[in-house]
Amino acid sequence: DAGVIQSPRHEVTEMGQEVTLRCKPISGHDYLFWYRQTMMRGLELLIYFNNNVPIDDSGMPEDRFSAKMPNASFSTLKIQPSEPRDSAVYFCASSLPSRNRGEKSPLHFGNGTRLTVT
Amino acid sequence: AQSVAQPEDQVNVAEGNPLTVKCTYSVSGNPYLFWYVQYPNRGLQFLLKYITGDNLVKGSYGFEAEFNKSQTSFHLKKPSALVSDSALYFCAVKAAGNKLTFGGGTRVLVKP
């Protein structure tokens, strides 16, 4: 199993540019989560999906952020326009299906995308 | 609302000594509790979880944690720390739904 795969690993962009982060969850997992990690705020849940449907997006900072999951094997997190305060490490995670009591299962994390907005 | 507190930003311990990383939580209802470890430039890795049953749970790499309902705590322990245990440790709680809330993290430094 390749685990959760995120791309790119590093992204450096200028303020105002659009940024798209990508995630491939573990096959068979039907929960997908996007987290943001910063020194100041720690790990913040941005949004999570179940069966490709957004369940809770209350952590999405503002309208500049959007996330999609067009199918079970792919999700994107887009920031448009990007700002320097968006600089952080963005993690994607997935977990087991709800039919297997996914809420009791641990999350499996990707290695993250380190975003720097100058 | 659910929350997790890790009162220590950093824990220093000598190799071979016991290691404890503290965690307290606040939830409505029965908690599902988790510990994760993060190495530099990597994602979080699952160590162990408490769902129900025995209060002492054992996990990966010789770690264990004790669930204490009356103190709402879930401290992580290892009897004999290794230099390779130096990392960032996160406690997390999940109550209703599948929303995992993390503590602020505790950096562990094990000195040879």
Image: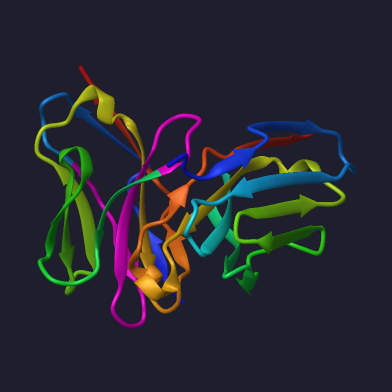
Query: Image quadrant for the N terminus of chain A?
Result: top left
Across and down, in percent, residue A60 comes to: 68, 63
Q: Is residue A42 visible?
A: no
Q: Which residues are magenta?
A: B20-44
What residue sits 72% from the left and 61% below the top?
A68
- Total residue callouts: 0
Left or right: B1 as drawn, with respect to A7: left
The quarter holding residue B73 reads: bottom left
- Pinpoint residue A13: horizontal percent, then vertical percent: 82, 33
Drawn side of residue B32 relative to residue B19, left or right: right
Q: Residue at x 17, y 64 (%)?
A: B67
Q: Residue at x 45, y 71 (%)?
A: B98
In the foreground, B106 or B98: B98
Report the colour scheme. Answer: rainbow
Question: Relative to B37, is B42 on the left or the right?
Answer: right
Quick check: can you spot residue A74? yes
Which residue occupies the extreme right position in the image? A16
Place residue B62 in its image quadrant: top left
> Is A79 a magenta residue?
no
Q: Position of residue B9 (x, y in %)?
A: 38, 42
Query: Which of A102 and B9 lies nearest the eye of the viewer?
Result: A102
x, y percentage for residue A117? 78, 36
Identity of the residue drawn at 21% across and 54% down: B75
B8 versus A59 height, above or below: above
Q: Quadrant of residue A18?
A: top right
Quadrant location, the C terminus of chain A? top right
State the residue in front, A105 or B37.
A105
On screen, residue A15 above or below B59: above
